[in-house]
Image (cartoon, helix red, strand yellow):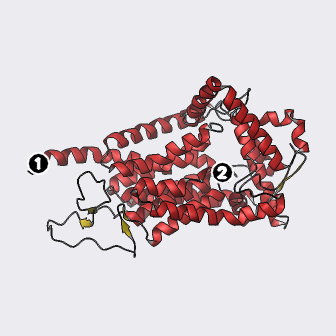
């Protein structure tokens, strides 16, 4: 313990773990708490059915029937692996969320000094939203960790560590296009830093190492947790290294990862369902005459005809209603879209359950304001290459666009907050960069 206190890095990780464990262990553990958020109940039911050998499905009271592909299988499998026990799930999620702190630190260390990396890790360690969600039986904690580690492994495969920088490439090229050399060396003839793993080099640098394949596998597996991650294995490597090798491999790997699920759905439901039959419900939730930008699925209770349909039929029926609304109510759709974006990036909780609590508003609003402010400064003034800044910002842009087509909620931005924390850590490199620029003469 004393060693951890003397070591800032260990202290941050220990603090993150203690806070999360303290939070999840103080929560009530009876099943009734799951009913506060219906999604928790659905995951719990699927996991319980899986544990007793009935498979990945649950009884949905709204439709008076079983649904077999309403949720992706990844998180229910995780809950089942924890024995379906609420306390065990929370403790494991506390550990997983602490690993996200480590992923943010390692990601920041690829380009920044230890002080900046510690700031990034510290921001993730005290993130009140991540801490809060680690105590819920929801997929956010697991997905956030998978994305953070996937991004780190991807970066590890295409970038050198801090202290090893690329030698200048052709004029106009971004970082990553040249060979690697040790920035501490003053010998221009020094050999490039050797690659840690066998790789294929392209315009984007080191793009096909073992770390890249592990990264793409993790990102592809994350689709089983949250289907909105479908395009991440394609676009994240493309933004980082501007090379099509990894995006093509990521797309192929995603198809292979989803294929068993699609085959299972074809067998049970008669059609190839690659993600879920929840897509129609989600789309209509976002675009209907009574939509506000928030999630409100009371309309399901007002449509008795849905009970007579199959789960695929319901999804298609609701999708068609939503698409018709999109086509005939453009001004309203535009207004709803802005409302969803505002809700997603609201500094304070807006739900009836948590937005009414003053403490939650103060803590959440204060943290979000600080994180967003530092990330903006880091993006515009931080000493990071342009493609790295875009890479760290991409999850925020991606999930904003994805959920503008459904509903807006603070929970949907959580996966973007760890990369934003890394971007925020770049603020500590601003003054250092400016000082160095003043000291160094301009060479002819």
Residue 71, percent across and down? 74, 53
Name the side, left or right, on which 8 lies relative to 97: left
| C-alpha gap between disc 2 and disc 1 | 54 Å
Query: Callout 2 environment at 10 Å: few (<14), some (14 to 19), or many (20+)?
Result: many
Q: In the rendered structure, find residue 442 and report the number of the disc placed on it.
A: 1
Check the image and report above or below for 182 versus 405: below
Question: Which secondary structure, mark 1?
Answer: loop
What is the count of numbered marks? 2
Q: Residue at x 11, y 48 (%)?
A: 442
Name of the residue lying farthest toward the left: 444
Q: Furthest-top residue in view?
A: 331
Residue for point 31% across, 41% down: 381
Residue 126 in view here: no
Q: How would you rate the neighbour count of disc 1 (Cα within 10 Å): few for under 14, some for 14-19, many for 20 or more?
A: few
Any part of residue 404 in sight: yes
Is residue 380 or residue 243 the one in the foreground?
243
Q: Quadrant of residue 108?
A: bottom left
- The answer to whether 101 is drawn above or below residue 201 in the figure is above
Q: Which residue is mark 2?
A: 135
Residue at 37% across, 59% down: 109
For the residues labelled 2 and 1, say whether their Cβ atoms are less than 8 Å apart: no
Residue 34 x, y percent position in the rendering: 76, 48
Instruction: Give 345 or 386, whichever is nearer the viewer.
Output: 386
Q: Which sits earlier in the primary sequence, circle 2 or circle 1?
A: 2
User: Of tags 2 and 1, which is closer to the observer?
Assistant: 1
Give above or below for 147 relative to 416: below
For the residue pair 153 and 260, the one nearer the viewer reads as 260
Q: Where residue 14 sits: x, y (%)? A: 49, 59
């Amino acid at each position: 313990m004393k060693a951890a206190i003397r070591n800032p890095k260990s202290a941050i990780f220990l603090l993150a773990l203690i806070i999360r464990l303290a939070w999840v262990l103080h929560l009530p553990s009876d099943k009734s708490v799951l009913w506060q958020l219906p999604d928790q109940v659905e995951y719990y039911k699927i996991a319980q059915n899986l544990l007793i050998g009935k498979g990945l499905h649950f009884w949905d009271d709204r439709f008076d029937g079983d649904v077999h592909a309403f949720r992706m299988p990844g998180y229910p499998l995780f809950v089942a692996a924890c024995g379906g026990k609420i306390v065990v799930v929370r403790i494991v999620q506390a550990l997983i969320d602490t690993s996200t702190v480590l992923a943010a630190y390692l990601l920041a260390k690829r380009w920044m000094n230890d002080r900046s990396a510690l700031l990034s890790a510290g921001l993730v360690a005290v993130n009140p939203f991540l801490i809060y969600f680690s105590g819920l039986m929801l997929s956010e904690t697991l997905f956030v960790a998978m994305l953070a580690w996937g991004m780190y492994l991807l970066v590890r495969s295409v970038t050198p560590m801090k202290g090893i920088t690329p030698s200048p490439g052709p004029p106009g090229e971004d970082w990553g296009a040249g060979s690697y050399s040790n920035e501490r060396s003053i010998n221009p003839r020094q050999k490039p830093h050797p690659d840690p793993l066998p790789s294929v080099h392209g315009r984007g640098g080191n793009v096909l190492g073992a770390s890249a394949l592990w990264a793409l596998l993790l990102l592809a597996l994350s689709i089983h947790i949250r289907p909105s991650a479908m395009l991440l294995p394609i676009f994240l490597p493309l933004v980082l290294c501007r090379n099509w090798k990894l995006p093509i491999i990521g797309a192929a790997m995603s198809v292979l990862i989803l294929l068993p699920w699609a085959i299972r759905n074809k067998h049970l439901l008669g059609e190839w369902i690659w993600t879920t039959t929840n897509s129609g419900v989600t789309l209509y939730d976002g675009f209907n005459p009574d939509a506000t930008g928030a999630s409100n699925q009371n309309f399901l209770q007002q449509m008795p005809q849905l009970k007579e349909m199959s789960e695929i039929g319901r999804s298609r029926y609701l999708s068609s209603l939503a698409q018709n609304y999109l086509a005939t109510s453009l001004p309203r759709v535009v207004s709803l879209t802005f409302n969803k974006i505002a809700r997603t990036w609201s500094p304070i909780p807006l739900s009836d359950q948590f937005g009414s609590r003053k403490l939650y508003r103060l803590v959440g609003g204060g943290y979000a304001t600080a994180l967003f402010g530092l990330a903006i400064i880091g993006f515009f003034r931080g000493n990071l290459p342009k493609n790295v800044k875009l890479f760290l910002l991409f999850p925020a842009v991606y999930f904003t666009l994805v959920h503008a087509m459904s509903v807006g909620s603070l929970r949907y931005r959580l996966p973007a907050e760890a990369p934003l924390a890394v971007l925020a850590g770049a603020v500590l490199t601003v003054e250092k960069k400016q000082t160095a620029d003043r000291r160094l003469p301009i060479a002819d």
